[in-house]
Image: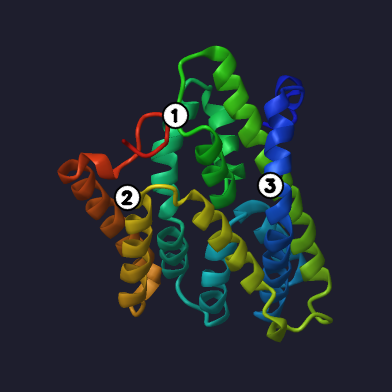
Amino acid sequence: MFWRPELRRHPEFMAGVRDMLPVAPGLGAWAVMSGVAMVKYGLSPLEAGLMTLMVYAGSSQLASLPLIAAGAPLWVIVATAFCVNLRFVVFSAHLRLYLLYLPKLPRLITAYLSTDMSYVMLIKRHPVPTENADDRLGRQAYLAGNACVSWFSWMSLSLAGILLANVLPMSWGLGFAGILALVGILCSLLQTPLQRVSALVAGAAAVLTLGLPLKRNILVAIATAVVVGLMLEKRLPGFGPTESGGTKP
């Protein structure tokens, strides 16, 4: 993806890099804590390194660690990681409009490299897909720039956390910096009443169903916000965004 010359030379690539750089420290702190946690829960440095490189999903990694330490069945661990990452089903359904024209292998690589941050930044800068070939390349270049920064930040600092696991205590709470980074980027995206209401509904649903097993409160939150958002958009047409991404007059 970001190794393709036509993407790296495109101005949108550097725009993606610049937009991701301010949140990279938060992602890095989260990555360090994830690396420390994997070793603290009993994984060897080699196992933790392979998990970092192959999974590349901090939330599901952290959710599965207690289950791995407790010797839970494999299907329970896989189901937990699956439920935690269900939000990417929603992301993928939307990104499909941006990337469907690509061959399967680039789409698979993009799926591996895409994160919450890269997705929301792409949607913020380019809220509407396009059929124009030059504009498509620009959107892909922007996503590649985002992915480049987030992937290298996560991998380098997660591996650093693995190597320094016996030096850095988990009590520092470095992972909270990653959560703050996500909250910050989320708040910057809430530009319409419909988006604000949907975010509040999702947050309330996630808190009210916190006790559900396998992190299914995340799935409930997403489903509730989607249903409420669609209902409001149909009943209150002026409540949602226009095709250009702004608020309807």
Sequence-first tag of 2 and 3: 3
Could you tell me residue 153's position as x and y percent? 75, 53
The image quadrant that residue 185 belongs to is bottom right
Q: Secondary structure at mark 2?
A: helix
Q: Nearer the viewer, mark 1 or mark 2?
A: 2
Disc 3 residue type (three-letter)? Met
Give residue 221's position: percent from left, percent from top: 33, 63
Q: Residue furthest left?
A: 235
Image point (26%, 59%), residue name: 224
* Residue tagged 2: 194
Q: Which mark is residue 128?
A: 1
Residue labelled with disc 3 = 20
Q: Earlier in the sequence, mark 1 or mark 3?
A: 3
Q: Residue at x 65, y 60 (%)?
A: 51
User: Mark 1 near mark 3, Cβ–Cβ under 8 Å?
Assistant: no
Q: Is residue 48 above or below residue 154?
A: below
Q: Residue furthest front?
A: 249
52 sits left or right of 128 in the view = right
